[in-house]
Image: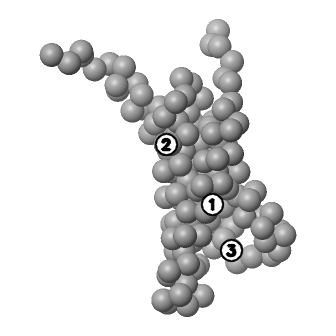
Amino acid sequence: MAAPITIQWTRVLIGGFLAEVSVVAVVIPFFLIFGRHVLLYVAPLASLAMCFVFALWVGRRLGSGFVLHGVLVGVVATLLYVGLTLARPEPFAYVVAHVLKILGGAAGGFVGERRRAETKNLPPAP
């Protein structure tokens, strides 16, 4: 039987926060240059990418539970956005962005887990 996964909550919370801040940082220049309508396209892509990146960051010091931690990064980022907007109704593209945050986090966790497995299988350096 596998050992239980210990969730690194501090890293998850910081990763989710930084992912959401990064989404805003990426989206604002597009909004200022192209206007509000571009947010429907940029926000979902930025959400996916930033949660992927910060899930990789969270996974750097993990021994197990990479995908779970990645999903939690996406959930934290989503909850932060929903809290900041006071859960007001939003365009469908933003709902898709929330789903992509979670999927991006899961994908980042998956890639982090694969990278860890590959580095363990490398032969020693000469």
Vertical order, 45 against 19 (above or below): below
Name the amino acid, label 1.
Answer: Glu
Q: Earlier in the sequence, mark 1 or mark 2?
A: 1
Could you tell me if residue 49 is visible in this image? yes
Residue 45, percent across and down? Answer: 51, 66
Residue at 60% from the left image edge and 88% from the top image edge:
36
Q: Earlier in the sequence, mark 1 or mark 3?
A: 1
Could you tell me if residue 71 is visible in this image? no
Disc assigned to residue 56: 2
Residue at 48% from the left image edge and 50% from the top image edge:
53
| Label 2: element kind | helix
Q: Which quadrant does the C terminus fall into?
A: top left
Occupied quadrant, residue 40:
bottom right
Give the class, few, some or many, for how many residues have Cα within 10 Å of label 3's Cα (few <14, many ≥20): few
Front one among 18 and 91 = 18
Front one among 15 and 41 = 15
Residues tagged 1 and 3 counted as in contact (Cβ below 8 A): no
Residue 78, percent across and down? Answer: 70, 58
Q: Earlier in the sequence, mark 3 or mark 2?
A: 2
Residue at 49% from the left image edge and 58% from the top image edge:
49
| Label 3: element kind | helix
Name the amino acid, label 2.
Answer: Leu
Residue 116, percent across and down? Answer: 42, 28
Residue that mark 1 sits on: 20
Left or right: 82, with 14 as reference point: right
Residue that mark 3 sits on: 92
- Indicate which label's residue lies in the foreground, 1 or 3: 1
